[in-house]
Amino acid sequence: MRTTWIKWPLFILLCLIWGSSFILMKVSREGLNASQIAALRIFSAGIACLPFAIFHFRSFPFNKLPILILTGLCGNLLPAFLFATAIFRIDSSLTGILNSLTPICVAVIGIVFFKDRIRPARLAGILVGFAGLCLLTLSQDSLRLYNLGYAALILLATLSYGFNVNQVGHNLKGYNPLHIATVTVTLMAIPAGLVLWFQGFFELNFTDTTIQWSVLNAVMLGFAGSAIGTAIFYVLVQRAGGLFASLVTYGIPFVALFWGVLDGERIGWITILSLLIILAGVFLANRPEKNKAA
């Protein structure tokens, strides 16, 4: 079919964009603090989405505004700040691996809070993913008691993503997902701009090359990772289906590992094994049921 070939270039491009987000955050920390990185990321994404959001706002009734704000908070703003804080103490490659737990968090929150049906395969996937997480935690020198809380921030971010996916599926069902993305990201540009103001971002010495490079990477993170990446994801959902689009989860950590190796981060075989165990859990937890023959 005419649209079949396009799904693979989109898939690869999305893996590259989202998998590179972690190294962009790491580079940004050279001249910006965590709050500035996160706020600039969301503010840049909001500005990029604004021209589209102006028209997409009409798609939603006023009583959906609280849900849209909650979606922006849980799906964009809160995770951005959690990731930006954690990246100051944890390797970017490890952050990418922990991010791969998001689909398992989607399954867990769906079961616990939204009463989704528990399938044996889903339960097995959750347990396998948790086993991979435990192995990863025990094997990493960078995950010791003094900074284990920073890894917990990443897990909190994946839980936030998981809650957001479930609440969008239940409370915004039937709305165009691209409209949801542009409107919610644009709404979050308002608090992000306030954070930039109170964090003294506009008082920085922008003639300093370190600050210039950090700002550029943070803006790229917002424009590419949060704005363009989200748009590509929803185009992929529309053209190839949600199941195919969800497979991007498997590509992101490998791209993050690649950048980590180039940046001199140490990656051992146990780390790779932990990643494979986690991805096996993701596969089991999100594997669709086979239709039973009549």
Image (cartoon, rainbow, N blue to C red):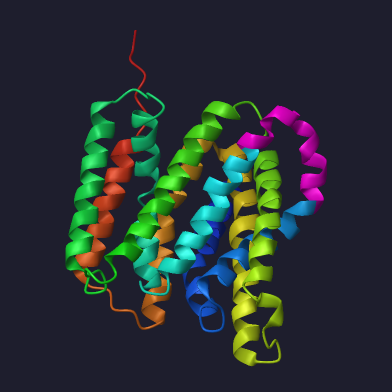
Q: What percent of the width, then of the height, locates residue 122?
A: 28, 33
Quadrant of the image occupied by residue 150: bottom left
Q: Which of 187 and 248 is in front in this view?
A: 187
Q: In this view, does 137 lie to the left or right of 18?
A: left
- Identify which residue is drawn at 20% across, 69% down: 269
Q: What percent of the width, then of the height, locates residue 52?
A: 78, 48
Quadrant of the image occupied by residue 196: bottom right
Q: What percent of the width, then of the height, locates residue 263?
A: 41, 82
Q: Which of 34 and 184 is in front in this view?
A: 34
- Identify which residue is drawn at 45% across, 46% down: 160
The magenta segment is 51-67
- Identify which residue is drawn at 44% across, 59% down: 252
Q: Please say whether residue 101 is one of the residues in the magenta stretch.
A: no
Quarter of the rendering occupied by the N terminus:
top right
Direction front: furthest residue: 198
Q: What percent of the width, then of the height, locates residue 29?
A: 51, 78
- Identify which residue is drawn at 40% across, 62% down: 96
Q: In this view, does 108 lie above or below 15?
A: above
Q: In this view, does 31 lie to the left or right of 155?
A: right
